[in-house]
Amino acid sequence: MSGAGRKPVVEVRRSERRRRTVSAYRDGERVVVLIPNQFSRAEETEWVDRMLARLAARDQRIHRSDADLAQRARQLASRYLPEYGDVAIPASVRWVHNQNGRWGSCTPSDRTIRLSDKVREMPRWVADYVLLHELVHLIVPGHNARFWELVGRYPKTERARGYLEGIAAAAQITVG
Ligand SMILES: [Zn+2]
């Protein structure tokens, strides 16, 4: 979470060669926004705001390592499954490329969890749902009432399931 809530220093660069395209990237603490030279001041302001919002939205998504995933698992377990202690902490959790049509999977016998790297590109609140879903499988292997009761402690469960179902409808992927 770098610079959350702080307005970054913006450097606008105008280019004669640009006609319509606008792009933005981070350069240390600054954000550089490239705009066509013909843009008015109003267009410049509008596009700078738009590109800052876009960068902020990208920051909300996760591009994290297995170590970050393990840390997030511990955070979610202590927040939503506190009475289970170490039972809700996986022995290993990692991003994997091939998930055989699943967003995530759990092997309770060796306490390992795998998340599809497709989930990595999703908003954090959706990734958190997938991770918590698999953490609950460490406690309840199947999808019974007790399972959904525990998963339901996560307030965005229904919203996240809807999000994933929307994508899965096209791709035939399910949370394992
Ligand atoms: Zn499941």
Image (tube, rainbow, N blue to C red):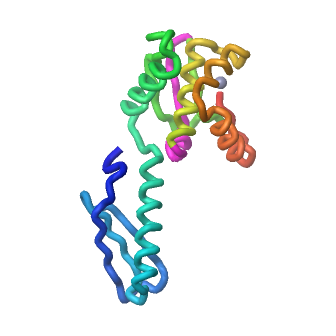
Q: From this viewpoint, which residue is outermost toward the right?
A: 169
The range drawn in magenta is: 109-123
x, y percent for residue 117: 51, 40
Image region (quadrant) for ligand 1 = top right
Foreground pick, 175 / 161: 161
For residue 18, side relative to residue 111 (left or right):
left
Foreground pick, 42 / 150: 42
Look at 50% across and 35% down and name the residue there: 96
> Residue 26, relative to residue 17: is it above or below?
above
> Residue 159, relative to residue 67: is it above or below?
below
Look at 42% across and 86% down and name the residue there: 40
Foreground pick, 55 / 138: 55
Foreground pick, 86 / 50: 50
Look at 50% across and 41% down and name the residue there: 124
Quarter of the image containing the N terminus? top left
x, y percent for residue 69: 43, 31
- Residue 32 in the magenta stretch? The answer is no
x, y percent for residue 60: 46, 47
Look at 68% across and 34% down and name the residue there: 158
> Residue 65, relative to residue 44: is it above or below?
above
For residue 88, side relative to residue 33 (left or right):
right
